[in-house]
Amino acid sequence: MKKRFMAALLIAILCLSFGMVVCATEGKSPRLVDFADILTESEEEGLLTILDEISERQQFDIVVVTTNTLDGKSPMTYADDYYDENDYGFGAEKDGVLLLVSMEDRDWWISTAGYGITVFTDTGITYLSEQFLPQLGDGNYEEAFTRFAYLCDEFITQAQTGESYDSSTLPKAPFSVGYHLSRALLIGLLIAVIVTATMRYNMKSVRFQPAASAYIKSGSMNVTEKRDLFLYSHVDRTVRQKSSSSGGGSSTHTSSSGKSHGGGGGKF
Amino acid sequence: MAELKEYKCPCCGGAIAFDSSIQKMKCPFCDTEFEMETLAGYDDELKNEQADQMDWNISASSEWQSDEMDKLRTYVCKSCGGEIVGDENTAATSCPYCGNPVVMMGQFSGALKPDYVIPFKLDKKAAKEALNKHYKNKPFLPKVFKDQNHIDEVKGIYVPFWLFDAKAEANIRYRATKVRSWSDSNYHYTKTSHYAVMRGGTIDFERVPVDGSSKMPDDLMESIEPFQFSEAVDFQTAYLAGYLADKYDVDAKQSIERANERIKKSTQDSFAGTVQGYVSVIPESTSVRLHNGEAKYALYPVWILNTTWKNNKYVFAMNGQTGKFVGNLPVDNGAFIRWLFGLWGVISAVVFGISYLLWL
């Protein structure tokens, strides 16, 4: 009687705990949360499909959250807390990345966790943001988020080779023909003008000699007075520019729930 | 007054001239060569002979205005009796009728006798070759100028120069700065130290030449400097045979200003060269005192080539000793524009290509 009860209890606990695990996986928060309602239904659907596909394939959560208010928190705290509270992330280390876009003060923040801290270095985040911020600023939210998703995919793949995108290994920006052409034309014009002006100057060879150095009696120079007198000195001071990208790697902080996060953000 | 001298070959009686390639007198008729030393004696001999040949005349006809007459001298050629007309400074020329080289002895008498002469080392052929070389690698030179170029005349001229020695005494004060930079974690620092730098001393100059002929453009003469004075010899009129020569018409007093100007500049440059280890050096006060020595009178060899193109005169000059060749050339503006745009295109393409390769 007592044994049966114990067995039943054990089964019940097992069932319950198993059910909870199933629940946690299945009922996990969606990877796209549009509190600010800046995406249409169809855009949301398409974007969510992309995020889910990449996240499942890479076993790495890519989450996009938009909000109208930060509830008085800083973008960093909001993003970290949202990530922790909704239990995003794969594996024990909760590998993942979350992009927060707040319409309140037009803030954005990328929060990384677990393996994500390795994948997204500080330099990497700066580079990543440069790729989608223009669209974000223009209000093309769907395009910005899609770009973000695909770039994350690229970053994760790169990190799996053992070397995350960092100051030395960043992907190249596309070759800007306009910029390089105008720069080449400017340099070309400058050099051409110098060369032709010199050639033109050389057409004239009749000039007065300014000095008579050819007629100095060799060894006749006799320096009798040679004094160098220090008068005064002054010191100029300029503030040193902090170079953040020089070292490479990822900087981390600890969120309110005690978990370690990396990330970076700004305004758009 | 002037007297005319013609060097006759003691061998065949032909008129002889100085040959720059062998540095001797050479008779063009019988190819006999004479050492210059021999000629020094021969020269004296001829001078003695000259005494009883004072039958030259200055035959200024009455129609000449007096100021014109002042500037013209006529001589009678001793070989053919033709009349040689020269200006008041002509000292050596050739007879326009028989082509024999003549030297006007009167232009070198007394105080007019030059102290030194640097004999010609390069001949007319070398001067023409140097002109062709001067035209080379000049893409802006109008093609027509090069192709249709007729040299009007090539003249070997002994140009009178004044040579000035000077001892320059200088006291110069400079304001100089040194800059040191360092950084800590928050700031970049730049420390600028100011110094007063004093320099004083002397420097000697030897034989700074100044063109003593008003006919020769001063800038042209300065452009073919320097002449190597080590090759100068004591003056002998025989060296002038076969060339043109002028006596000076700008005296030493007028010329010294130009020499001192150049000496002063050189002195300043030399002392500025002793101020070292500073980032910037600006002279604040300069005092250069010159003690000029005796001025010497010398004849330096110069080839002058004249050409006319599109009614413009182009004068070229070559140092008859070192071969340094100068002369302003006309610029073809079309070629200039073509080169400018051509280079612009090519360099831009290269820079663009390099930036693409760097991006890869």
Image (cartoon, grey):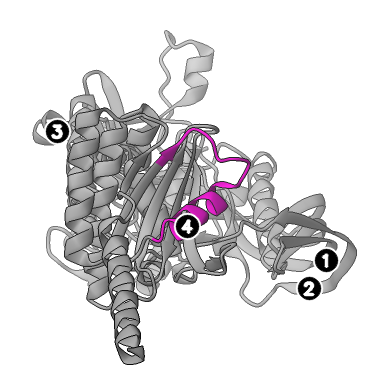
Percent position of residue B125, x then y:
17, 53
Rendered residue at 31%/56% (across/down): A28
Q: Chain of mark 3?
A: B
Q: Foreground: B83 or B356?
A: B356
Amino acid at the residue labelled 2: Val
Residue A19 marker: none
Marks 1 & 2, CB-CB < 8 Å contact:
yes
Residue A85 marker: 4
Percent position of residue A150, x then y:
22, 51
| Gap between marks 1 and 4 measured at Cα | 83 Å
* Neighbourhood count class around disc 2 (C-alpha, 10 Å): few under 14, some 14–19, many 20 upward: some
* Neighbourhood count class around disc 4 (C-alpha, 10 Å): few under 14, some 14–19, many 20 upward: few
Amino acid at the residue labelled 1: Gly
Q: Tell me which label, 4 or 2, sits earlier in the chain.
A: 4
Determine which residue is flagged by label 1.
B200
Determine which residue is flagged by label 3.
B150
Amino acid at the residue labelled 4: Glu
Determine which residue is flagged by label 2.
A223
The region drawn magenta spans A66-87
| Gap between marks 3 and 2 measured at Cα | 54 Å
Instruction: Return the residue found at the far top.
Output: B63
Q: Are marks 4 and 3 on the same chain?
A: no
**On the rendered structure, is B135 left or right of B7?**
left
Residue B12 to residue A41: above or below: below
Q: In front: mark 1 or mark 4? A: 4
Asked whether A84 falls inside the magenta stretch, the response is: yes
